[in-house]
């Protein structure tokens, strides 16, 4: 026998690696004159370019081997469907596998009624194909969709962080110039600068169905990178 369970579908923005280590630059020459210290932030955002779709196959049978065999066949069908649509095999990885007995607890007694096998997969794909991957997996035998995570590729993340850092330093210099001018001083250089970075996630905007409701469409919101800097300037 085969049981299909309905699970809550959740979509989040992936935050793995979102906090950068503190970075500091110091002019070791020191300063004996006046200084101006400021804190400033800069941001940059972009649409996520990667998605990780989590799908699972579950089956219940009279024996552990029968449950395992049914799940194995269904997972193979899911993998074949994804491969046929151009998703590389290396982008489909196992996240969970297990076989456990199922008991019926009635009248204070436990009765073994079968075995449940579960095989969960993570499918990495372009952010614009998340809905397609869901439909392919469900059509091939997946019994659950456990969520979609949107994120940025390493290259895109580095580009955004560089842009955010540049904006933060420009904002810091503008503030320092304003403070120095109010004190009848002029900024002459940077004595010390320190920065850290974090990604601020935005929730997914909406779920959509195409005309006729035959396809799943997921529209993620942008991922924003914010960098904060603390800078001490020399002044004269």
Image: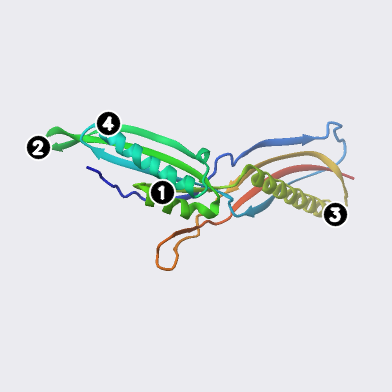
Q: Name the residue under label 2.
A: 107
Q: Residues within 10 Å of mark 4 (few under 14, many from 20)?
A: some
Q: Does dot 3 land on a helix, a strand or a loop?
A: helix
In the displayed image of the protein, which residue is found farthest to the right?
Answer: 236
Mark 4 or 1 closer to N-term? 4
Q: Mark 3 points at which residue?
A: 181
In the displayed image of the protein, which residue is found farthest to the left?
Answer: 107
Mark-to-mark CA distance, 4 and 1: 23 Å
Mark 3 and mark 4 in contact? Answer it, CB < 8 Å. no
Residue under the image location 14 percent in, 33 percent down: 111
Relative to 171, is 230 above or below?
A: above
Q: Name the residue under label 1.
A: 137
Residue closer to the observer: 92 or 25: 92
Mark 3 or 2 closer to N-term? 2
Q: Does dot 2 land on a helix, a strand or a loop?
A: loop
Q: Mark 4 points at which residue?
A: 65
Task: Single out the mark in the foreground, 3 or 4.
Answer: 4
Residue closer to the observer: 24 or 38: 24
């Amino acid at each position: 026998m085969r049981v299909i369970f309905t699970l809550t579908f959740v979509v989040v923005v992936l935050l793995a690696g979102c906090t950068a280590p503190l970075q500091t630059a110091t002019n070791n020459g020191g300063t004996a004159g006046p200084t101006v210290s400021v804190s400033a932030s800069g941001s940059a955002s972009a649409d996520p370019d990667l998605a990780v779709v989590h799908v699972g196959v579950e089956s219940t049978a009279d024996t552990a081997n029968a449950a395992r065999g049914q799940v194995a066949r269904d997972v193979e069908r899911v993998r074949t469907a994804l491969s046929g649509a151009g998703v590389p095999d290396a982008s489909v990885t196992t996240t969970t596998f297990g076989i456990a007995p199922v008991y019926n607890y009635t009248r204070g007694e436990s009765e073994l009624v079968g075995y449940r096998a579960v095989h969960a997969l993570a499918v990495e794909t372009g952010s614009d194909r998340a809905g397609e991957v869901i439909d392919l997996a469900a059509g091939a035998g997946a019994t659950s969709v456990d969520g979609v995570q949107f994120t940025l590729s390493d290259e895109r993340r580095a580009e955004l962080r560089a842009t955010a850092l540049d904006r933060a330093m420009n904002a810091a210099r503008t503030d320092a110039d304003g403070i120095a001018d109010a004190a009848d001083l002029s900024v002459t250089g940077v004595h010390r600068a320190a920065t850290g970075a974090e990604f601020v996630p935005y929730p997914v905007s909406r779920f959509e169905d195409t005309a006729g409701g035959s396809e799943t469409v997921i529209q993620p919101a942008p991922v924003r990178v914010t960098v904060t800097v603390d800078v001490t300037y020399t002044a004269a």
